[in-house]
């Protein structure tokens, strides 16, 4: 599973000498049958994959057992995993607008199954630490990285507030698709800042409401059929939040409206997706009447 010795060496090389003492027991607790009822089933899949090398039909069968795949696509030993999200499209929009990742240490908060973390490594990052509370996503990453064999990228079953903060050691911290799930988004922004070295770069991606005025609104019940969406700001309001949290050099590097070409059901994720969350008579509105998902990527530096 997760090589905690190699993880400890990586963290110490970043200057996070106290992190292994906190994270090692957390990993042990969560990567177990007590951490999730399906752990043993998923563990069997990850453990069986190395023996299936060279047998694409067997690899495909095993990877299917880790469905649903939300982020991708991946190609694993010739098997194409067509995830719900075409995450490659988002990465293509933002990668050239970021500060160079070559040689940098990166924290990826809410990293899912590590799709972006692996792209960050390919862009030259020295080490990438991803965290996500979903054990299935951690197992998907372990399955993929069993073939990638990248020794300097990790996906850990943890949340941001569980890390020993402040720890101002990372050159770049990503938070993509996380902010609108936070009951206290400003606390989240402050915690992200506590991970960055002085002049380190934050990369923040979130849903925003269209509008030139600074305001935010909370759905009464659901947004695009999601019950865990809290405060949705306009870009001017989000900029104010970031300024109040002490960030500087705040820039918008991408704005896009999510389409059903980028987020959709596939054989690897057969549940309802974006199409079912939009008004069937007006694709610019959600089924609840809110503006359809507009996403912004912003960068900023920590003081």
Image (cartoon, grey):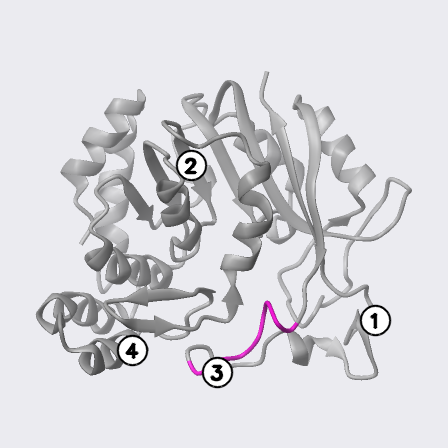
Q: Is residue 291 magenta?
A: no
Q: Quadrant of residue 164?
A: top left
Whether 153 is drawn above or below 190: the answer is below
Mark 2 — residue? Answer: 107
The structure residue drawn at horizontal position 21% and vertical position 32%, both measured from the top left corner, is 8
Whether 264 is drawn above or below 201: the answer is below
Q: Which residues are magenta?
A: 260-267
Q: Is residue 141 left or right of residue 234?
A: left
Task: Tell me if residue 17 can be seen.
Answer: no
| Residue density around tag 3, few if under 14, some if 14–19, many if 20 or more, within 10 Å | some
Residue closest to the eye, 295 or 135: 295
SS for tag 1? loop
SS for tag 2? strand
Verify CB contact (< 8 Å) between mark 3 and mark 2.
no
Whichever of callouts 3 and 2 sits on the residue coming sooner in the sequence is 2
Q: CA distance from mark 1 to mark 2?
A: 35 Å
Q: Quadrant of residue 16?
A: top left
Q: CA distance from mark 4 to mark 2?
A: 28 Å
Q: Which mark is residue 65?
A: 4
SS for tag 3? loop
Measured as percent of width and height from the top left, residue 146 is found at: 20, 58
């Amino acid at each position: 599973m997760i090589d905690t010795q190699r993880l400890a060496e990586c963290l110490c090389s970043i200057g996070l000498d106290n992190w292994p003492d906190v994270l090692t027991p957390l990993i042990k607790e969560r990567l177990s049958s007590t951490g999730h009822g399906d752990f043993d089933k998923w563990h069997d899949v990850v453990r069986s994959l190395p023996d299936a090398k060279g047998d694409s039909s067997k690899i495909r069968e095993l990877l299917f057992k880790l469905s649903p795949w939300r982020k991708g696509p991946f190609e694993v030993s010739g098997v194409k995993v067509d995830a719900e999200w075409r995450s490659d499209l988002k990465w293509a929009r933002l990668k050239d607008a970021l500060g160079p990742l070559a040689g940098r240490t990166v924290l990826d908060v809410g990293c899912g199954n590590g799709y972006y973390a692996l792209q960050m490594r390919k862009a030259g990052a020295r080490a990438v630490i991803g965290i996500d509370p979903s054990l299935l996503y951690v197992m998907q990453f372990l399955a993929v990285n069993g073939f990638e064999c990248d020794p300097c990228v990790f996906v850990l079953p943890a949340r941001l507030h569980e890390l020993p903060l402040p720890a101002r050691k990372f050159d770049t911290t990503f938070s993509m698709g996380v902010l609108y799930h936070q009951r206290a988004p400003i606390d989240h922004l402050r915690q992200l800042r506590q991970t960055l070295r002085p002049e380190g770069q934050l990369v923040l991606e979130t849903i925003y409401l269209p509008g030139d005025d600074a305001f935010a609104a909370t759905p009464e019940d659901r947004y695009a059929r999601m019950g865990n969406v809290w405060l949705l700001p306009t870009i001017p309001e989000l900029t104010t939040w970031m300024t109040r949290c002490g960030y500087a050099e705040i820039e918008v590097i991408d704005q896009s409206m999510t389409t059903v070409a980028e987020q959709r059901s596939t054989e690897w994720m057969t549940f309802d997706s974006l199409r079912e969350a939009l008004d069937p008579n007006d694709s610019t509105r959600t089924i609840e009447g809110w503006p359809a998902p507009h996403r912004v990527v912003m960068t900023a530096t920590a003081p």
